[in-house]
Amino acid sequence: MEQTSLFPPAAGHIGTDESGKGDYFGPLVIAGVFVPEGQTSVLTDLGIKDSKKIGDRRVQELAALVKTGYIHSVVAIGPERYNDLYGKLRNLNRILAWGHARVIENILERVDCRLAIADQFGDKSFILDALLRKGKRIELVQKVRAEEDAAVAGASVLARAEFLQRLRGLSIDVDFELPKGASPLVEEAGVKLVGRLGREALGRVAKLHFKNTARILESVGAGGSI
């Protein structure tokens, strides 16, 4: 039988967000932040907002502040693991749901909270189904433009900072600068990378189900899937 806490749930809520889902190179990162009641204005005053509206250097600075001041969790799914999961699930929303559920569960290990807010990316039942025992008690709200919420914005900053750090690490590993996004510039980089290290290198640094992969392989004359 599950024990009932002698104390009421903490006032406040969890916000979750992700980074990297639209980037060909690099990991998929999901982060969560618990913001106590009355603390949202503190985050806003620090300049915490949707990470897409903040420069890379400032994102790193703000992420350090969030990590210091708030209960948080970050789950990063590197390209090789991502490709394995996508090959099994064939559904990005299910991978996202698993990541959002994990960060919620990780935070609930440290604070008893009954509300989580996430950006709208698919049927919220995906997240609810992926939650474990502690998460089953939480109210989950998905919103369009959820980054307007301070906790979700904090999670957005943490996720982006981790994505940038890991993308740099992958660039160092292959001795080649991997650009962000999924533009023609990214495909040019992919062609150069395959020319230097072979087609198998893409699986180490890129999300292979993106259409960029087929165009890169076609450009280097290495048709077919990886």
Image: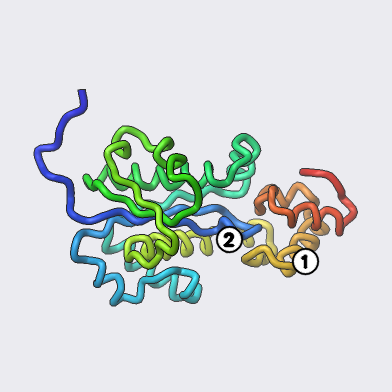
In the depicted view, which residue is nearer to us: 26 or 136? Answer: 136
Q: Secondary structure at mark 2?
A: helix
- The residue depicted at 65 percent of the width and 53 percent of the height is 205
Q: Secondary structure at mark 1?
A: helix
Query: Where does the image place residue 207, in percent across and percent down from the top left?
Result: 65, 51
Badge 1: how crowded within 10 Å, few (<14), some, or many (20+)? some
Look at the image and tell me in which quarter the C terminus lies. top right
Colouring chosen for the image of the structure: rainbow
Q: Earlier in the sequence, mark 1 or mark 2?
A: 2
Q: Residue furthest top?
A: 1
Q: Amino acid at mark 1?
A: Glu
Query: Where does the image place residue 169, in percent across and percent down from the top left?
Result: 57, 59
Query: Where does the image place residue 206, in percent across and percent down from the top left?
Result: 66, 53
State the mark number for residue 41: none
* Alpha carbons under labels 1 and 2: distance apart: 17 Å
Which residue has dot 2 on it?
167
Look at the image and tell me in which quarter the N terminus lies. top left
> In which quarter of the view is residue 158 placed?
bottom left
Q: Amino acid at mark 2?
A: Leu
Query: Where does the image place residue 75, in percent across and percent down from the top left?
Result: 45, 49
State the mark number for residue 188: 1
Badge 2: how crowded within 10 Å, few (<14), some, or many (20+)? many
In the depicted view, which residue is nearer to us: 191 or 53? Answer: 53
- The residue depicted at 65 percent of the width and 67 percent of the height is 179
- The residue depicted at 52 percent of the width and 42 percent of the height is 94
Work out whether 168 lies above or below 44: above
